[in-house]
Image (cartoon, rainbow, N blue to C red):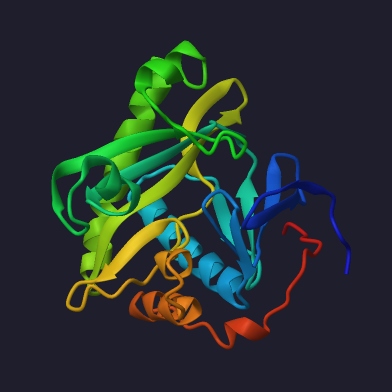
Amino acid sequence: MNRRRRIYEGKAKILYEGPEPGTLVQHFKDDATAFNNKKHDKIEGKGVLNNRISEYLFVKLGEIGVPTHFIKRLNMREQLIREVEIIPLEVVVRNVAAGSLATRIGVDEGTPLPRSIVEFYYKSDKLGDPMVTEEHITAFGWANPQELDDIMSLALRINDFLSGLFLGVGIRLVDFKCEFGRLWENEQMRIVLADEISPDCCRLWDVETQNKLDKDRFRRDMGGLVEAYQEVARRLGLHVDNPMRVKTGPVLVRSK
């Protein structure tokens, strides 16, 4: 096995040097974290499920014209992606009051919102990912007004599509977090969806039972996280054999 140079390691993923310039290999770990890494554990099989679910959703989004960094899945734990300049923002789209929003505005969790709400958080573990406004974003140069317009438009488009997709399999998309990056092609730059979309960064509730099928099961010590992720994969039509046994590491990828 040929190991590639590690570029970056985050809480849930590792990025390795890709086989060609402008590409990276994104490896999904089994680490589960919450509350800015104050709570941490390893849950065997989680990375396999997130890889498969995120691949499926990125492919579906690409089919409707949403630009993404995704190229292809390499194995059960890794994807080949385009290298992008990550914009230091977590973009959260909310359809139902839950989590910090329910606490912040004092409404019951599960209350439908009058319309989808987009929030921005500055990516900084040291600062606890503080919530920021469009004024902060443009004033500090994290994104310019046109980029922010593109991000807002893409985030709402992604929300509309995913809400319908999940509803079709009996799941309610309560909210989700996504990230965007700048993809440079020659002298041209465009904003693309990056990172991942999986039960790690979505709140997904069963439509009938309101059962949580996402990382809140870890945050709230409910147990059954892998089983919940497996249920999401099953409803999306994905077949993942023994996710807890897959140990694939970074491998050399040859382009055809």
Q: Residue at x 20, y 43 (%)?
A: 116
Q: Residue 65: percent from the left, percent from the top?
A: 36, 45
* Residue at the outermost bottom position: 242
- In this rendered view, identify the residue nearer to me: 128 or 81: 128
Q: Is residue 94 visible?
A: no
Q: Residue 62: percent from the left, percent from the top?
A: 41, 51
Q: Quadrant of residue 198?
A: bottom left
Q: Is residue 34 above or below residue 140?
A: below
* Residue at the outermost right position: 2
Relative side of 196 to 103, left or right: right
Q: Residue 94: percent from the left, percent from the top?
A: 27, 47
Q: Is residue 147 visible?
A: yes
- In this rendered view, identify the residue nearer to me: 180 or 119: 119
Q: Quadrant of residue 93?
A: top left
Relative side of 94 to 195, left or right: left
Q: Residue at x 70, y 54 (%)?
A: 14
Q: Is residue 164 above or below residue 19?
A: below
Q: Residue at x 32, y 50 (%)?
A: 64
Q: Quadrant of the N terminus?
A: bottom right
Relative side of 247 to 122, left or right: right
